Image (tube, helix red, strand yellow):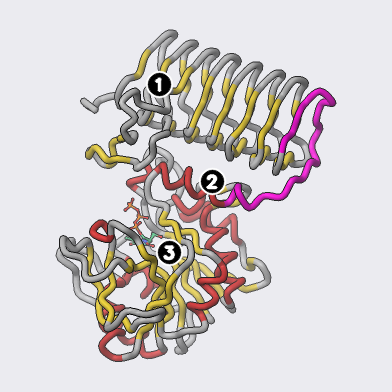
Amino acid sequence: MQTIVLAAGQGTRMRPLTDRRPKPMLPVAGDPLVAHTAEAAVAAGASELVIVVGYEADEVRDYFGEEFAGVPVTFAEQPNQRGTADAVRAGASHLDSGPFAVLNGDALYDRGSLATLYDSAPAVGSYRVDNPSTYGVLHTDRSGDRPRVTGVTEKPADPPSNLINTGAYVFPAQAHDWLDVGESERGELELTDVLERACVEAHVTAVPFDRWLDVGRPWELLEANEWKLDELDRRVNGDVHEDADLRGAVVVENGAEIDSGVVIEGPTLIRSGASVGPNAYVRGRTLVGRDAKVGHSVEVKNSVLMGGATVGHLSYVGDSLLGRDVNFGAGTTVANLRHDDEDIRTLIKGEVVSTGRRKFGVVCGDGVKTGIQTSLNAGVKLSSGARTGPGERVLREPGSDH
Ligand code: TTP
């Protein structure tokens, strides 16, 4: 099945992590997010991948090249992000006139479910949630395992079902002629309008997905890493001091160094060129990226340290995302829990949003530097290149009243 992967979006809700990088290239365990999508697609039966690129396109192009997992890759340029239907139209010009699949390049799909979708054309992947009102919700003609889809409504106040649209579709060949949709109310060219047309012209099946994760906001990138790090098998190729204690599914890549007195509880991935310790404690589904450094007596828990990030001695980092080349000064401490036990809230495009997590720390864009003994409150985001002074307390997002 020829497959279009949408990877042109600006990822504005993921800022500051997407200030300098497309969201699909953010790290999820050992690979970029979009590589997991592409891998699941190939395992499900994708015969070729057309990747639609736009924002920071070169990083995606350089990563994939001309072939991925044995299938050919081509790129379609979407110069302006005018909507998902526009993106698919750009991609479809590289396809033959047969049926085709479309996947969001910023979602994790489980392979088995995606394979069922590919075998059920025309079809849309659906996922059952308790709070459908914040998603695109599918209308179906009956309950049961594989209901027929009759339409889709974006963010309905009164949801017609609790089956939501995962952004994974297999369209019939005629859909090539349905891609010229008009602008929606929010001024975008939407793929859901193509789905609506497909529901009228064909029998579109809702294929239930066992697992799915839309990665739009920072804590969802943490959840994506939790998912994929859980799939690690222990593998130690790097240089590990005899006094270090690696427990469970710990991967230490070739060229990584683990010093004396370090305890690492898996699942944890330490990428090549990274160093940990001495006497550090790394636990709870953590990714230590390429060339990252976890210093003396540092604790890192359930976090993502992107390439080149450094956490200086005597620091604590929990449930946090640190961009490339972030540098935490000695004694930097992250709060990741509220005393009133409520879910951590953060600002997304100026609005206060609940993360739905009791534990969530901070998000730092590339190149953030903290002074010694900086305290960072739960839910704070620091924009790329931001600095804090020695002993500074950052209780709310700089420039906001949250
Ligand atoms: P969204 O998540 O709606 O958009 P986005 O990734 O730009 O993120 P944000 O809303 O935070 O700015 O997009 C869903 C998928 O479609 C995603 O994989 C990006 C892709 N996309 C395009 O390729 N082109 C487009 O014009 C749009 C709007 C999205």
Residue 333 appears at what percent x and percent y? Answer: 47, 18
Closer to the camera in the image, 85 or 266 = 266
Left or right? Give the position of 98 relative to 204: right
Residue 161 appears at what percent x and percent y? Answer: 26, 70
Q: Amino acid at mark 1?
A: Leu
Q: Is residue 149 magenta?
A: no
Q: Check the image and name the residue furthest to the top.
A: 391
Image quadrant where residue 180 sits: bottom left
Which residue is rendered at x = 52% and y = 83% of the image? 119
**Of callouts 2 and 1, the N-terminal one:** 2
Residue that carries the numbered disc 3 in the rendered image: 104
- Alpha carbon separation for disc pair 3 and 1: 33 Å
Q: Is mark 3 within 8 Å of ligand 1?
A: yes
Q: Which residues are magenta?
A: 228-247
Label 2 residue SS:
helix
Image quadrant where residue 275 sits: top right
Residue that carries the numbered disc 1 in the rendered image: 376
Tag in front: 2 or 1 = 2
Give the image quadrant in which the ligand numbered 1 is located: bottom left
Which residue is rendered at x = 52% and y = 78% of the image? 116
Closer to the camera in the image, 224 or 160 = 160
- Above or below 394: residue 48: below
- Alpha carbon separation for disc pair 2 and 1: 22 Å
Residue 46 got which mark? Answer: none
Residue 68 appears at what percent x and percent y? Answer: 63, 66
Tag in front: 3 or 1 = 1
Q: Amino acid at mark 3?
A: Asn
Residue that carries the numbered disc 2 in the rendered image: 226
